[in-house]
Structures are given as C-alpha cells and as structure tokens.
C-alpha cells in the first residue's frame, strides 16, 4: 500500500477507480479507519521541531480519507452494493473534522497548509454527502469555526479558489435543502450590539468582483443566496442589514472608472467581441449582469435597496457626469468621451431586463435633470450630424425602441403625435389596407434607374471574375439545403411546407423581396404581441377641447393622459416597479410567406419592365425560380385595378421648414431621423444603415399613428414631409447624379458585391462565434439580444460596420477576417473605395436605397394584411414559425 502516500497519484486514482469493480465495503471501511488512526496518532504526538514532517504525513492520510469517501459515495450512487456509508459514519462519530481543526490552529506557520487540506475535505463531503452532513453537528461545528476564522482574515491566494468552490457547492446544497439555511447564521458582535450574520454571503462578497472562474463561481453562489432570500425572510434581513447591496453598487462604480475614456474609430456599439476581448469591459459587464440577476431573484426589500444604491450611487453621480463631460479648452469639446459614456449606457441597457435593472436605468434616463434639462433631451440633441457621437446616439435610440416599452415610446414619439399638430386635419382617416397596398406600390416605384440592372447580370459578372481567378465572393454552394434552408437547421412542418429561400447562412438577403416579406411579418407580429397589454393602442389623435375665453375664442389642447400606476415619470425610486415594458429581445429568425392565395394565383412572369427582382445568390432550384417574381407578381396584382395616385409635392428644402419646427410637431426623434434620411447622399454608409434600420423598426409598430407617416398622401403639414416625399426627392437626385456616368452598370455590380460581402462576413462570423465559444451565452441573456437574428439588409448592415476584432474599445477599428486578406481583395470591396468621390458614393447609396425601398414596401404590405386578416396577431403564430 505504498501508493497511499502519494497525494497526486491518489487524486488520479480517485478518478480512475470504478466502484463496480474496485469497491469492497469492508476493505474500504478498514482502510479508512486505519488511515485516520495513523493521522490521529501523528496529531497527538506532533512536536514543533518535527512539525513539517507531521503536517505532510497528515495531509497524505487526509488524501486517502477523501479518496475512500468518494469511492463509497460513488458506490452508493450506482447502487451496485448495498452500503450504509460506514466511512462517513466513522468520520462523524470520531469527531474527525473538529479534531483536525483544533490541531490546525496550533501548527503556527503551517496553519494555512492544514486549512487547505480541511477545505478539500469539506468540499468533498459537501459534493457527495450534502443531505447527510449539512445538519450533522460533527460536520457543521468545525465548518462554521473555519468560516468564522476566515471572516476578517486576509486569505492567501492559493486558498481563495478552494474557499470559493466550497461556498459554491454549499449554496447548491442549501438550494436543495433550504430548511438548513438557518444553521449558517452566526452572531456578529460589535461595540453596540450583536446581530445575526449569514456567514456564507459575508465570505462571498470578497470575491464577487474578481475576474476569471473564481469571480464567476462567487457570483453564482451569491446569486443562489439572493434566490434563497426570496423564500427565507431571515436571510433577506441579514443580507439587507449587511454589506451585500453596498458592495455590489460601489463595485460597479469602481469598475466603471477603469473603462477606457474613448472608443476606437467607427465604433458606435459595444459588441460581444468587445466585451469578451476587453479585460476591463468584461469585468464591468459581468458586474452589471450580476446586479441585474440579483434584482430579478432576490427578496423585494433587497431589490429595492440595490436599485436605490445603484441609482443614487452609480447612475446619478457616475454615469450622469460621464454623459455630460466636457474637455477644458476654448471649444469645451468632449464628444469622444461622451460617445464612450453613451456606448456604456447602451450596454447597461442591453444587460438589463424588465424584472432587473431596466426600470431604474430608464427612470434615470427619462426623468433625471441636469441644469433643468432632462438627460433624454440631451441624448436626442446628439442625433444631428455624422460624428461618432451621433452614431452612438442612434444606437441608443434603437435599443430603447427594441424594449417595446410603452412609457419610452410615449416620451419619444406618441406624446407628440397624439396632439395631431403635424396633421392638416384633426380628424384624419385611419389607414386602411388599400392605403398601405398603394404605399407599397409607390415605394417600389421609387427605385433608382441605375438599379434597374437585373441581378442575374450581376451574378454573371461575379462568376466571370471567379473564372478569371478574381474571386470576390466566397460562396459555398456544396451544402445540402432543404426548402432553401441549410441542412441541420431544425424547422417545423409549417415552414417546410412553404418553401422559400430564406434563412440559409451562406446565402444573402440582398434583392430577396420574399425574405423582406417574411421579416416584415415577424417584426410587425412580434411588436404587436409585445404591445398587446399597453394601456392604449395609440391609433388616433386626441382632439383639442374647446375652451372659450373672455375676448377671443381659443382652443386649448387636452393634456396627454398619464397612467397613475404605470408611469415612468416618477420622482421616487419606487417607480421602478411601475414601468410597463415588454422584453421581446430574444427573437430568433422567423419567417412565413405573406402572399395570400389570390396573389399566388395571379403570379406572372414580368419581363418588360427592365427589372429582375431575383436573389443575387441562386441555387437554381424550382423554388428559387418561383421566388424571382415575388416582387413583380405583387406589382401585377395591382395592374388590374385602376387606382388614382395623388400627386405629391416634392419638398424643396427639409431644413427650411416653416414657422414651427418639425421637432415640436413630431418630436425630436422622428424629426432627426427624417432629416438624416433626407441627407442620405451626404452621409456615410454606416450612418445611412443605422437610420434606415431605425426607421424600419418604427414603421413596424402596430400603432397607426407611426406607420401612417409612411403613406404617400400628404396628410401632414407642409414643413413635416412624409418619408415617401423624402425618398422621392432622393431618387430624383440619385438619378441625376448617376445618369451621366459611363460605367454605371459595372459600379452597380461592385456596390452590390460590396454590400453582400459585408452581410455574409457578419453572418458567418456570428455563426463562428457561437460554434467556437464553448462557454457561449444562452440566447436569453440580455447582452446578446438580437445579435444573431437575420434581419433586413439595412439593419444587418448597420451591425456589420460596428463589429470589430480589436482587443479593447480604445483600439482602432479593424475589418473582420475573411477568406481573402485585405491586400488580395479587390479594392471595391473595401469601404474606403466608395468614399473617394460623390459619384461612387451615389452609386452605393442608390443600391442601398433600392434595398430599403423593398423593406418599406414589405412593411406596408404586411400592415395591409394585418388590418384585413383575422387573428393576424395571434401569439400562436410566433410559436408556430419559431426556429
């Protein structure tokens, strides 16, 4: 039995022993007793001069005891041998753990070494015998003594991991045996009083802000304590009176102070890459997500204290000044620092959930005032321009809209539209299905002339380049597909019956009008379901209430009704729990054909209009051939009906406006977005993609007041142009800029390839992140909301240009890796190529506008279907088409 004195070999043996072959109860028990007897003799006879050898010998015996205990436990789990747990009974009856603790305290400089062996033994017992030892006094008494001794000590680094793992396993065991929680309350004596203290939480607080596995295990364990507090009032009181909430709040503020003060170039949103590769950002994000999780599961009193401390100790004194900071100097400019602070705030929003921190963050954003100005008003003012600050502001607005929070939408949009000042009449006709169908046709008619080039010719041009050795698109066509979907993606029977080319990660959404219809339907339905429990449908304006005066007859607007118990505008922090939000962030790609049977019967091949609306990437299947005419068939079903389109006056100057500013009529958000849409030709691709994506989200809202701005009919005031009027003017300007170019066709092909390549790089990189990361987050984690969803091209492109591979936010922007190195790729596949001249940028913007028009047309068509179909918003639809 000489091998018993080799600890490393013992640990290896404990993992290799098979209780079905290597366990014999009597032999195991005899060996256990012998090892303890020898260890006990050494303990009784140990002398200071031989202490080193004695400690080493006792450690060797303890290793054998742990091995035998584990072998006995594994034998009981497999039920191969009927055993009563004789080794465990002997350990408890001999009071082994208490004797070991007392001896360890007398070992002087070797005290920490003995303590490490104790922690190993305690951890082994908790893992394998939790239900049997938790309430056993021979186990509990020395464990509490050990914990109490560590309470105010500086723990050596080599013991921290051992202690955290013991605490973690102990919390898991208590979750399964919550009746034993009260056994771990110790009395903490102070100069004035003696109060109970939950020793497990006290020890865990030392490690909750640590990095790596140690910090993760500590946060997981403390989260279990918070969960148990919801069912144990005494535990809730102890955590409330202790330092749990202050440690979490102050730690978050400290971690924020370590973050980079500026972001890299072209960074407008912090992605999962930034979080994973930025060391300090990882710590901050982990802390935010942990605070959010604690607020979700903890006792209401703990949640309230935590939110109060985060609001008063982090959001107001730390985030507020950071968002408004300026640099000393003649210009007082702090735009880079403000952009970084806004990006961090947007990240906090994505890390927060409705039951967690979301209400507190929104309360801070929409109600707190600095120098008499609400913070949200400052954020909205930063939307103007093409600077990084404006891009980050757009990203923040997108995140707020994706919350589907009624109070947020009231503050951003509806409180302006409900007054009806932007309309020519206070009694507008609600949009009907025909109006939306007309709008869809009108949007499709705005395609720039240079985009009439059939997509099949672009595909042929790409193939010619590939044949000559210049491969510009790395498209794998050798993968099996079922109904247009990559093999291996599970789809339900309904989607399989429909047969459309949408969802293959190796194909592009470019030019795929059918895909836009599917995406539009999902967006509208999901938002309708998310808003189903709002207090109002926001589908009509509030008529002004006449109020006579002594001398003149005036009308005074009736105030916008406020919700007494559902208002974001609250002066007390208790208002956190009154927000009406709906978190629909965990959306996955859903799709369903939105062409009704009548449309399908009227599908015809259209060859005379000079446009080929097929997908850029085709596999040549029969289903693909049918989809090539989706958009054309939609047009054809209107050719048989005579419709009188009202001539829309083209707006000459959006900025000039009238006496009343558009911002006061439709609000600063809509006003800024429409102004940016009008300036599409002067903006870069990233800004345009963000604007088009954000306007697309607003157009998907089920409330009639918002999509009503889509319609071509001039129902609005002259200084508030509709989106159609703006796009009509843009089309005319683009046609004028591109009509005189000699190589328009080739440039259009290059622009299409550029956008498609960006899309595919993003999608493949996202898929690789999910497959290569063994500890990839769950889909329901707040930070990763919407990260992998295949959406419209403009929305997808807005994400493409913000994803980076840099190690930290302060490093410069870098282009994602592709199969071809940047030096070997054609110059037109790089963004800098399209910024060389107005002509090149016009071609690229024309192609982008052409895709956006498809998206808007699809939204209009789906709105028409929503208004005319029965049970369109049935929540069973989401569950049916969900992947």
Image (tube, grey):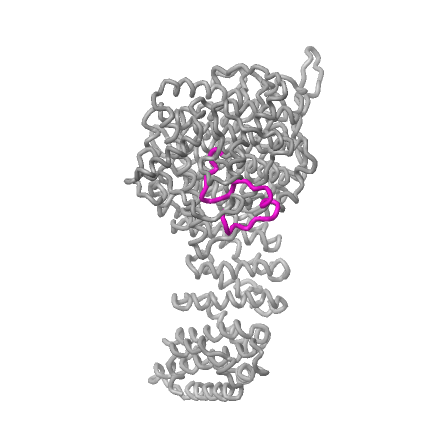
- The residue lying at 43 percent from left, 74 percent from top is 115
Q: From the viewer's perspective, is residue 683 above or below residue 487?
A: above
Q: Residue furthest top?
A: 551
- The residue lying at 57 percent from left, 56 percent from top is 240
Q: Can residue 254 be seen at all in this image of the molecule?
A: no
Q: From the viewer's perspective, is residue 42 above or below residue 497?
A: below
Q: From the viewer's perspective, is residue 369 above or below residue 16?
A: above
Q: Nearer the viewer, residue 779 or 279?
A: 779
Specify start and end residues of the magenta stretch as a single range. 486-511
**Magenta stretch containing residue 26, yes or no?**
no
Residue 91 point in image, percent of width and height: 52, 82
Q: Can residue 725 be seen at all in this image of the molecule?
A: yes
Q: From the viewer's perspective, is residue 174 above or below residue 727?
A: below
- The residue lying at 63 percent from left, 24 percent from top is 435
- Please give left or right for residue 175 compared with residue 252 in the image: right
Q: Looking at the figure, which quarter contains the N terminus?
A: bottom left
């Amino acid at each position: 039995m000489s091998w018993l004195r080799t600890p490393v070999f013992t640990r290896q043996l404990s993992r290799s022993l098979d209780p079905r072959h290597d366990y014999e109860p009597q032999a195991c028990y005899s060996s256990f007793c012998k090892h303890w007897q020898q260890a006990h003799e050494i303990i009784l006879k140990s002398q200071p001069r031989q202490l080193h050898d004695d400690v080493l010998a006792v450690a060797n015996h303890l290793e054998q005891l742990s091995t035998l205990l584990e072998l006995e436990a594994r034998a009981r789990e497999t039920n191969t041998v009927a055993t009563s747990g004789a080794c465990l009974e002997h350990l408890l009856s001999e009071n082994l753990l208490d004797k070991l603790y007392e001896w360890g305290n007398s070992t002087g400089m070797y005290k920490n070494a003995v303590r490490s062996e104790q922690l190993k033994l305690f951890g082994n017992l908790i893992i394998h015998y939790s239900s049997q030892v938790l309430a056993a006094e021979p186990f509990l008494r020395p464990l509490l003594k050990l914990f109490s001794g560590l309470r105010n000590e500086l723990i050596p680094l080599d013991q921290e991991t051992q202690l955290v793992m013991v605490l973690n396993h102990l919390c898991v065991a208590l979750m399964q045996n919550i009746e034993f929680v009260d056994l771990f309350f110790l009395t903490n004596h102070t100069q004035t009083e003696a109060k109970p203290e939950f020793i497990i939480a006290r020890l865990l607080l030392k490690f909750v802000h640590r990095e790596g596995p140690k910090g993760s295990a500590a946060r997981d364990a403390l989260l279990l304590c918070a969960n148990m507090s919801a069912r144990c009032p005494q535990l809730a009181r102890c955590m409330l009176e202790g330092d749990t909430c202050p440690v979490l709040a102050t730690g978050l503020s400290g971690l924020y102070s370590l973050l980079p003060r500026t972001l890299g170039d072209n960074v407008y949103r912090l992605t999962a890459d930034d979080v994973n590769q930025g060391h300090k950002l990882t710590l901050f994000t982990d802390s935010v997500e942990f605070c959010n999780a604690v607020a979700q599961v903890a006792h209401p009193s703990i949640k309230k204290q935590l939110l109060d401390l985060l609001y008063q100790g982090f959001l107001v004194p730390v985030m507020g000044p950071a968002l408004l900071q300026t640099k000393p100097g003649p210009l007082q400019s702090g735009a880079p620092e403000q952009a970084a602070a806004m990006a961090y705030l947007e990240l906090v929003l994505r890390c927060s959930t409705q039951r967690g921190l979301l209400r507190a963050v929104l309360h801070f954003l929409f109600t707190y005032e600095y120098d008499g100005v609400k913070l949200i008003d400052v954020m909205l003012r930063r939307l103007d321009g093409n600077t990084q600050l404006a891009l980050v502001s757009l990203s923040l607005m997108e995140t707020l809209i994706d919350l589907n929070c009624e109070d947020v939408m009231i503050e951003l949009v509806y409180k302006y539209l409900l007054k009806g000042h932007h309309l020519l009449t206070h009694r507008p006709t609600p949009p009907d299905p025909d109006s939306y169908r007309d709008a869809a046709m009108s949007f499709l008619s705005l395609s720039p002339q240079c985009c009439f080039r059939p997509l099949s010719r672009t595909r042929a041009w790409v193939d010619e380049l590939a044949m000559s050795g210049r491969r510009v698109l790395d498209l794998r066509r050798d993968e099996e597909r079922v109904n247009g979907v990559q093999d291996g993606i599970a789809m339900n029977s309904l989607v399989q019956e429909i047969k459309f080319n949408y969802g293959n990660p190796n194909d592009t959404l470019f030019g795929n009008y059918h895909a836009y219809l599917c995406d539009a339907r999902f967006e509208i339905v999901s938002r309708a379901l998310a808003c189903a429990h709002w207090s109002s449908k926001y589908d009509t304006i509030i008529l002004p209430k006449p109020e006579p005066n002594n001398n003149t007859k005036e009308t005074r607007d009736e105030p916008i009704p406020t919700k007494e118990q559902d208002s974001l505008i609250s002066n007390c922090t208790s208002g956190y729990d009154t927000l009406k939000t709906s978190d629909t962030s965990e959306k996955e790609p859903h799709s369903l054909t939105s062409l009704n049977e009548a449309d399908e019967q009227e599908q015809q091949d259209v060859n005379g209009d000079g446009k080929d609306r097929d997908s850029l990437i085709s596999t040549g299947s029969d289903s693909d051939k049918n989809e090539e005419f989706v958009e054309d068939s939609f047009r054809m079903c209107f050719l048989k009906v005579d419709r009188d389109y009202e001539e829309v006056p083209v707006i000459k100057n959006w900025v000039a406006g009238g006496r009343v500013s558009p911002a006061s009529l439709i609000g600063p958000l809509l006003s800024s977005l429409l102004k940016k849409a009008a300036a599409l030709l002067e903006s870069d691709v990233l800004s345009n993609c963000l604007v088009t994506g954000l306007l697309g989200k607003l157009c998907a809202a089920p409330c009639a007041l918002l999509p009503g701005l889509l319609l071509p009919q001039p129902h609005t005031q002259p200084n508030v142009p509709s989106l159609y009027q703006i796009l009509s003017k843009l089309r005319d300007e683009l046609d004028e800029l591109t009509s005189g170019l000699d190589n328009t066709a080739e440039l259009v092909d290059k622009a299409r390839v550029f956008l498609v390549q960006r899309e595919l790089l993003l999608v493949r990189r996202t898929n690789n992140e999910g497959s290569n990361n063994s500890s990839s987050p769950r889909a329901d984690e707040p930070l990763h909301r919407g990260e992998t969803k295949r959406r419209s091209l403009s929305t997808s492109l807005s994400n493409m240009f913000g994803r980076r591979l840099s190690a930290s936010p302060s490093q410069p922007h870098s282009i994602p890796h592709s199969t071809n190195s940047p030096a070997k790729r054609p110059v037109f596949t790089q963004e800098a190529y399209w910024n060389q001249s107005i002509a090149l940028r016009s071609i690229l913007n024309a192609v982008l506008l052409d895709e956006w028009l498809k998206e808007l047309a699809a939204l209009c068509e789906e709105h028409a279907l929503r208004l005319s179909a029965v049970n369109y918003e049935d929540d069973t639809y989401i569950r049916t088409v969900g992947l």
